[in-house]
Amino acid sequence: MQFRPQGVCSQMINVELDGDTIKSVQFVGGCSGNTQGVARLVEGMNVDEAIARIEGIQCGFKPTSCPDQLAKALRMAKAQDN
């Protein structure tokens, strides 16, 4: 599933689930080291656990962040799978 984030530097987030488990995450654009780190940390994690850990994180003065946008993408992907 492709998700177009808003309010952050990354331009696209690609998410693949295997049931309720995050199979893979790929950010297009954004801060390369940070987005790769976040993607690797959540791979293999339960979707709901990942959302609980990263939802609401802010980037500086922005009301959102790449991890927060990933939480939104995961919610959307989970809804599509059900």
Image (cartoon, rainbow, N blue to C red):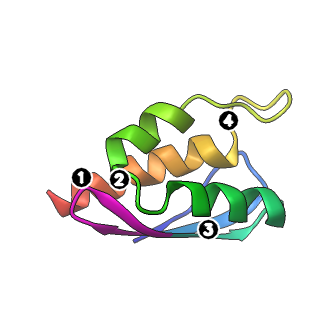
Q: Are marks 1 and 4 in contact (CB under 8 Å)?
A: no
Which numbered marker is on residue 12?
3
In the displayed structure, 43 sits above or below 68; it is below
At which x and y percent is residue 30? 79, 62
Q: Quadrant of residue 63?
A: top right
Q: Amino acid at mark 1?
A: Ala
Q: Is residue 32 left or right of residue 6?
A: right
Q: Amino acid at mark 2?
A: Met
In the picture of the structure, the residue carrying the numbered disc 2 is 76
Q: Amino acid at mark 4?
A: Thr
Element marked by disc 3: strand
Could you tell me what secondary structure mostly forms the magenta stretch? strand
In the picture of the structure, the residue carrying the numbered disc 1 is 79
Q: Are marks 4 and 3 in contact (CB under 8 Å)?
A: no
In the picture of the structure, the residue carrying the numbered disc 4 is 64
Q: Are marks 2 and 1 in contact (CB under 8 Å)?
A: yes
Magenta-drawn segment: 16-24
Ranked by sequence position, the earlier of labels 3 and 1 is 3
Q: Residues within 10 Å of mark 3 (few under 14, many from 20)?
A: many
Ranked by sequence position, the earlier of labels 4 and 2 is 4
Q: Amino acid at mark 3?
A: Met
